[in-house]
Amino acid sequence: MRCKIVTALSAALFSLSSAASVAAATVGERHLVAHEVSAVLRNASHDDDLRITVWYPAAPGAVEAPLDIGPPGKPVFTPGSAAPDAAFEDARPRPVILFSHGFGGTARLMAWFGTALATHGYVVIAVDHPGNNGRDPMTIAGAVLSWERPGDLATALDTAKSDPTIGAHLDLNRLGAAGFSAGGFTTLVEAGAHVDFERFLRFCDAHPDDGVCAPQKEFRFSRSDAEAFFAQPAAKSALAHAKDDLSIPGVKAAFVMAPAIVQSLDPESLKSLRLPVRILLGDADKVAPPATNGEVAAGLIPGAKLTALPHVGHYDFIAECTPAGDAAIPVCPTDAPRAATHETAINEALAFFNAALAGK
């Protein structure tokens, strides 16, 4: 049996013992802007800007500031805190995690995860995917060209490597990938899975009510809207590259939370993955139903391990909401405490990456 189902409790206890061995540090945050050719088609502004966020262990004395999202003094999300442009804790090269947010999300919305890894010694490189993030207008191109997402992380990594402040701190022999929702899809492609977009279309034709096929809360568009987009020459050109090898060389481990659009991945490519993969999801997820997403991936990937959290839904993996967020944002209310879900995710990720990237 390729997949091992791990109970949430036992996994959390194991993860806690592993994570506790690394002392927590203050977190620094730096922002970069790269030029990504494919962003021109996806960004509403048609520029090639790709925003990059880097979290890392900061020097003692660095002062963290809240990373709140929302109006000043009235945040709706509280993802954590970090010290802007702080110096690195020391000169040691650190293991690196590439992180991809979900459909319509942002790097900052997932800062609860990235900053937690940074407190334990990792450099986390995240992006705001062009045309598919919560800071900019969403676009049809950003929504449907999911296979362009791994390239965003590849560009972000190259940009961080060449940055005079960040590059020397990256241990590229210890490179992992992580993501949430569509970011979980991104992570699996970075790890070597191949995209089969036609397979996804056939799946949605047969299962139009599946959570990944239904209109998404973050950005609603119709099948006819997508077809009109793909009739354009630039979109046809992008589609022609969907089945390319989009993996990122050097990625040695993949941690995915509530992975979505798994039906757009070639099953044979999932069977061919040979690196460690850990999947964490909620058994109450209706947006990326486990039976057609995470469980499928876990069943195909050799040695993949799956943890299913009881009563946890899809949006339990985004940042903590304030009472104002609970009242105004439909995805904020949750049946399970979001803090507990985050704690399990952080502890499992630390245990996984500490083991998978140790000595690499």
Image: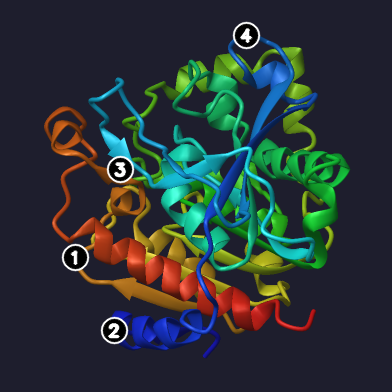
> In this figure, which colouring scheme has been used for the structure?
rainbow
Q: Position of residue 163 (x, y in %)?
A: 83, 39
Q: Residues within 10 Å of mark 4 (few under 14, many from 20)?
A: some
Q: Residue 209: which disc?
A: 3
Disc 3 residue crowd, few under 14, some 14–19, many 20+, Cα 10 Å? few
User: Relative to 291, is 2 on the left or the right?
Assistant: right
Circle 1 SS class:
loop
Amino acid type of the residue that numbered disc 3 sits on in the rendered structure: Asp
| Image quadrant in which you'd find residue 96 | bottom right
Which kind of residue does numbered mark 2 sit on?
Leu
Looking at the rendering, in which quadrant would you find the C terminus?
bottom right
Of badges 2 and 1, the one in the foreground is: 2
Tell me where residue 39 appears, x and y as whole percent: 70, 23
Residue at screen point 58% across, 58% down:
178
Q: Residues within 10 Å of mark 1 (few under 14, many from 20)?
A: some
Q: Nearer the viewer, mark 4 or mark 3?
A: 4
**Residue 289 on image: x %, y %:** 34, 57
Looking at the rendered structure, which numbered label has been put on residue 311? 1
Q: Nearer the viewer, residue 31 or 172?
A: 31
Residue 21 appears in the rendering: yes
Check disc 2 and report the residue beneath it.
9
- Residue hosting label 4: 45
Q: CA distance from mark 4 to mark 3?
A: 32 Å
